[in-house]
């Protein structure tokens, strides 16, 4: 036998559903400690590269490849579980998302080439610290903003 829910029961069910979506989105993000750790690693990489220029040619390549591997693995279901993320928000690949990603990559490349052309002392240190702070401070904020927007979508 099926009964029609009362308006209050329907509102309560919808509130529970919205809360569940928000909880799932929050669980799919990285903890703030990961963002701070990534910022410290990026800053230390810049300082170490600046003060040990011999290492910049050989060791930094392996270090960069290892960090890239961590990022790629963390985007898989198995890697997410390894890093403590229980779920991931499924995002549809849209033309706009691809365009924004490509625009970001081009802007990052242009900024790197512009910095490389300048003859500034301790460039690696400054860039490492700036991007390390950006990751540590801006990363959690951006993640919360993005996940909240994804959770609000129908």
Image: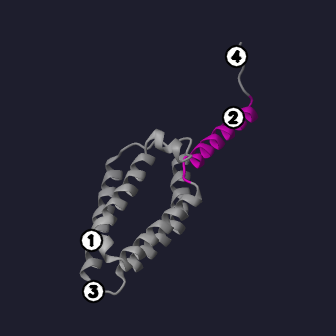
Closest to the observer: 84 or 60? 60
Sequence-first tag of 2 and 4: 4
The residue that mark 2 highlights is: 13
Q: Which residue is mark 3?
A: 119
Q: Is residue 145 left or right of residue 93?
A: right
**Splitting the image into 4 quarters, where does residue 137 fall?**
bottom right
Magenta stretch holds residue 14: yes
- Between the residue at mark 2 and the residue at mark 4, the CA separation in whole angstroms equals 16 Å
Query: What segment carries the magenta color?
Result: 6-30
Q: Are marks 3 and 4 in contact (CB under 8 Å)?
A: no
Badge 4 element: loop
The structure residue drawn at horizontal position 45% and vertical position 48%, both measured from the top left corner, is 74
Residue at position x 30%, y 78% in the image? 115
| 2 and 4 marks in contact (CB < 8 Å) | no
The magenta stretch spans residue 53: no
Assess whether mark 1 and mark 4 are in contact (beta carbons under 8 angstroms): no
Q: In this figure, which residue is indicated by the disc labeled 1?
A: 110
Residue named by callout 4: 2
Secondary element type, mark 2:
helix
Q: Residue 39 location, x and y as percent? A: 49, 67
């Amino acid at each position: 036998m099926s009964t029609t829910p009362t308006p209050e029961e329907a509102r309560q069910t919808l509130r529970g559903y919205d809360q569940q979506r928000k909880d799932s989105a929050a669980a799919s993000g990285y903890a703030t400690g990961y963002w701070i750790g990534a910022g410290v690693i990026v800053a230390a990489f810049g300082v170490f590269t600046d003060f040990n220029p011999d290492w910049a040619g050989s060791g930094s390549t392996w270090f960069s490849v290892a960090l890239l591997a961590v990022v790629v693995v963390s985007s898989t279901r198995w890697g997410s579980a390894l890093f403590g993320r229980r779920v991931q928000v499924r995002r549809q690949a849209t033309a706009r998302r691809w365009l924004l990603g490509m625009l970001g990559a081009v802007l990052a490349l242009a900024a790197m080439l512009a910095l490389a052309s300048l003859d500034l002392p301790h460039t690696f240190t400054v860039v490492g610290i700036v991007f390390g702070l950006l990751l540590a401070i801006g990363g959690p904020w951006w993640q919360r903003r993005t996940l909240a927007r994804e959770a609000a979508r129908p």
